[in-house]
Image (tube, rainbow, N blue to C red):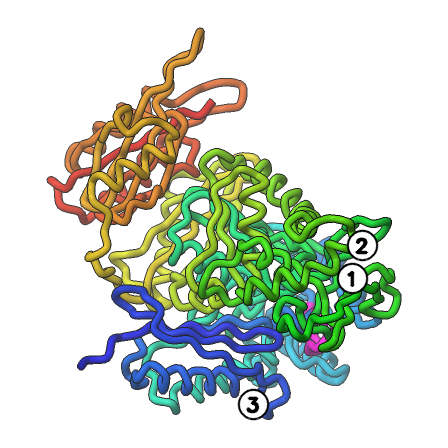
């Protein structure tokens, strides 16, 4: 029997390193391995990565040559910053006159606090002329003498004129230190923020380079020929060489792996992803099939690092219950893991004999109101997982499922203490824990303007069953636990797409400049191994900040999923009708391609215009896009320029807020080209023409337009 080609995802956590093998064709999970993270090995976390890979190949019966894709996510960069384990940065400021005043102020970055009592180790030197090689050498030698292990060059307006920073690095190269220029990290204006982002990147550069080299050498030695990719903080992956240049992109990448799994495996198009561990829940948003990102806050300051917008709540599967005055007063933030106690629900009924409720301080300084059970088998913590199991919320086969009898026995002493029954006590526990999560979920739904009627809750992580099912019940939203939820993060790493984001500040950007930024992003992902024919690029132009942003994504190889499970016409119609919240008889097919079908209906309200909501459903029966009111028209590649010019002209609004072209999406072949980020009609039409380029003249094109208010 032939072994399948596999995609391998490895997630390096603080305690364990999880690895999964996914069939490269069907995307089904073939194997999973958990090994302790090797922080203290001489090769560091690289040793655990290789050990996990070896055991995974042995488990699946695959050879190194069968690995088609290999990626890993790591908390190493995040931990380095949190723990203050960073290199001393030598910052070279460049400039004369007023520019010198600006750059000399950058020396204040040495006051950045990494951890309590630990500041960013930074030493500063100044050069007035970057072409003065003797002066640059003196600056480098001065910095080396003060302990600099990595160099950063920064000059005002280097985004437009990078020659000065580059000249400094060229002169410094023979000294053998890792180095970077501020303009290489971000192309956005703002000397202070740009340099701070570059300095933080440089602080973790030596450590990350060492790990990258060890992992690369070990993987090559193991016989894997697939290029090694690394998880980014925005939900994509990047080539190892790119990580060597910008390791800061791996900071905060842990939560990004989980939401990438929700996107790719669960095919979520609109909703909230909750990754629940033992102590906390990371909450993030998927909107119109894309993760929500924003500029991250690092060391208490905003940066130019685009990262997943993730908000963390101190409630997880192991969160302990707090009581007082005969009632449940709260849940968490302390967990059974921190207290060093086993979960009561995983004890046997015999171990729970003669149980009595007591309260403790899990750690010095904590309030003494955390409930524990002292029983025949010892002391146990009452947790969210105990309550979820007692109510039957944890499905068969779930990582956190236990014997229902044990779960009820675990809650019974607390129920008696509260003067109620087991079901009521368990519900009160979950209510208290969910309250904190619900507050954040509601805020994110408002922030991203999700439709609460159509958005879904998806739970991942080993503690998913303790949070997501009860939250769905109490909020009235649809909810489900992701398949293989306990390894959703490494699955996300295995399935993630190559991603690159290019940002430029271009006042009054012309269509040629917008297309140039788009092309740069596309070239970047292709250079990292993405198949050119499958690259998708989303372009956004923000007229308020004059920012042109292009986000390109692509697979390292074109994947063809097993079609045996594809939805039929009836299933797709039902999915659309359920999302539209109407009878299937009132839903009609408006247009379609081989990969997507557009369904629509009409809603009539008194004294208001008729609305035509639509849903775009893919061949798996998953709703990939929805709009409250849209116009749909089918044409061909040859006829599209004329049709789109007419549609955009008819739908563009003009007012005090400026010109606002419609939000346009094109269904082309197997994908949805999202052009909704462009407000100006002419650049919008130019981007549409670029999407049509190199396609057959008779290929069908479906245009979906939403008029902006």
In which quarter of the view is residue 491 placed? Answer: bottom left
Q: Which residue is mark 2?
A: 323
Q: Determine the residue positioned at 77% across, 82% down.
A: 146
Q: Do we see residue 249 in this rendering?
A: no
Number of residues whose C-alpha sits closer than 10 Å to that of mark 3, classed few (under 14), some (14–19) or many (20 or more): some
- Judged by depth in the image, the label closer to the viewer, 3 or 2, is 2
Quarter in which the N terminus is drawn: bottom left
User: Mark 2: few, some, or many residues within 10 Å (few <14, many ≥20)?
Assistant: many
Q: Is residue 594 magenta?
A: no
Measure the C-alpha gap from mark 1 to mark 3.
42 Å
Height in image: 220 above or below 513?
below
Residue at 88% of width from left, 65% of height from top?
365
- Counting the numbered discs, the total is 3
Give the camera-side residue of 153 and 574: 574
Q: Is residue 413 left or right of residue 434?
A: right
Answer left or right for 247 relative to 523.
right
Q: Is residue 83 visible?
A: yes
Q: How far across and how far down the image is residue 559, in percent?
A: 26, 62
Q: Are marks 1 and 2 in contact (CB under 8 Å)?
A: yes
How far, Cα to Cα, is label 1 from label 2?
6 Å
In front: mark 1 or mark 3? 1
Task: Of the two numbered discs 1 and 2 on the same chain, state the one appearing first in sequence.
Answer: 2
Residue at screen point 47% across, 40% down = 455
Q: Identify whether 87 is placed above or below 257.
A: below
Residue 240, x across and y down, in percent: 45, 74
* Region in magenta: 82-92
Residue, disc 3: 43
Callout 3 touching callout 2 (CB < 8 Å): no
Q: Secondary structure at mark 1?
A: strand
Picture layout, residue 282 above or below residue 640? below
Magenta span contains residue 89 = yes
Mark 3 and mark 2 lie on one chain; the one further toward the N terminus is: 3
């Amino acid at each position: 029997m032939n072994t399948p080609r596999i995609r391998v995802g490895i997630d390096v956590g603080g305690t364990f390193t999880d690895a999964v093998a996914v069939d490269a064709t069907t995307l089904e999970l073939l194997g999973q391995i958990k090994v302790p993270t090797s922080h203290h090995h001489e090769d560091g976390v690289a040793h655990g990565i290789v050990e996990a890979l070896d055991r995974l190949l042995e488990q699946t019966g695959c050879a190194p040559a069968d690995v088609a894709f290999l990626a890993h996510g790591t908390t190493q960069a995040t931990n380095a910053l949190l723990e203050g384990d960073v290199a001393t940065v030598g910052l070279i400021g460049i400039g004369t006159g007023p520019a010198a005043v600006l750059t000399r102020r950058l020396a204040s970055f040495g006051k950045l606090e990494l951890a309590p009592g630990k500041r960013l180790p930074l030493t500063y030197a100044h050069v007035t002329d970057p072409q003065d090689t003797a002066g640059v050498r003196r600056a480098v030698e001065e910095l080396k003498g003060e302990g600099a292990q990595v160099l950063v060059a920064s000059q005002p307006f280097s985004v437009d004129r990078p020659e000065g920073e580059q000249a400094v690095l060229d002169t410094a190269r023979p000294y053998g230190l890792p180095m970077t220029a501020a303009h290489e990290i971000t192309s956005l204006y703002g000397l202070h923020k740009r340099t701070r982002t570059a300095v933080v990147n440089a602080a973790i550069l030596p450590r990350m380079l060492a790990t990258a080299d060890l992992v690369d050498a070990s993987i090559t030695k193991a016989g894997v020929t697939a290029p090694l990719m690394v998880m980014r903080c925005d939900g994509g992956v990047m080539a190892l060489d790119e990580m060597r240049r910008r390791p800061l992109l791996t900071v905060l990448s842990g939560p990004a792996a989980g939401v990438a799994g929700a996107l790719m495996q669960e095919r979520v198009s609109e909703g909230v992803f909750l990754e629940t561990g033992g102590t906390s829940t990371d909450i993030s948003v998927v909107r119109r099939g894309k993760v929500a990102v924003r500029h991250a806050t690092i060391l208490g300051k905003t940066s130019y690092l685009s990262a997943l917008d993730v908000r963390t709540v101190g409630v997880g599967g192991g969160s302990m219950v707090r009581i007082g005055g005969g009632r449940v007063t709260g849940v968490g933030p302390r967990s059974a893991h921190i207290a060093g106690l086993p979960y009561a629900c995983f004890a046997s009924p015999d171990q729970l004999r003669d149980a009595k409720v007591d309260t403790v301080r899990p750690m010095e300084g904590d309030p003494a109101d955390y409930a524990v059970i002292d029983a025949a088998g010892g002391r146990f913590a009452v947790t969210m997982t105990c309550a979820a199991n007692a109510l039957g919320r944890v499905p068969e086969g779930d990582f956190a499922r236990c014997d229902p009898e044990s779960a009820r026995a675990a809650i019974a002493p607390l129920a008696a203490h509260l003067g109620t029954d087991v079901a009521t006590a368990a519900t009160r526990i979950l209510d208290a824990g969910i309250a904190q999560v619900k507050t954040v979920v509601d805020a994110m739904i408002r922030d991203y303007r999700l439709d609460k009627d159509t958005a879904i809750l998806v739970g991942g992580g080993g503690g998913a069953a303790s949070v997501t099912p009860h939250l769905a019940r109490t909020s009235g939203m649809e909810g489900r636990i992701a398949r293989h939820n306990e390894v959703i993060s490494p699955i996300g790493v295995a399935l993630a797409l190559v991603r690159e984001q290019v940002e430029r500040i271009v006042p009054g950007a012309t269509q040629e400049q917008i297309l140039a930024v788009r092309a740069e992003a596309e070239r970047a992902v292709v250079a990292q191994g993405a198949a050119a024919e499958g690259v998708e690029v989303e372009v956004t132009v923000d007229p308020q900040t004059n920012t042109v942003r292009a986000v390109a994504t692509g697979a390292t190889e074109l994947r063809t999923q097993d079609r045996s499970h594809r939805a039929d016409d009836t299933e797709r119609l039902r999915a659309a009708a359920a999302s539209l919240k109407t009878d299937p008889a009132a839903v009609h097919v408006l247009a379609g391609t081989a990969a997507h079908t557009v369904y629509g209906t009409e809603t009539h309200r008194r004294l208001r215009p008729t609305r035509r909501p639509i849903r775009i459903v893919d061949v798996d029966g998953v709703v990939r896009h929805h709009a409250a009111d849209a116009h749909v028209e089918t044409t061909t590649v040859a006829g599209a320029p004329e049709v789109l010019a007419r549609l955009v002209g008819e739908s563009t609004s003009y007012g005090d807020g400026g010109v606002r072209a419609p939000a346009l999406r094109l269904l082309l072949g197997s994908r949805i080209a999202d052009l909704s980020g462009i407000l100006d009609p002419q650049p919008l039409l130019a981007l549409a023409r670029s999407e049509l380029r190199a396609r057959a003249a008779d290929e069908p094109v479906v245009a979906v337009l939403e008029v902006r208010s």
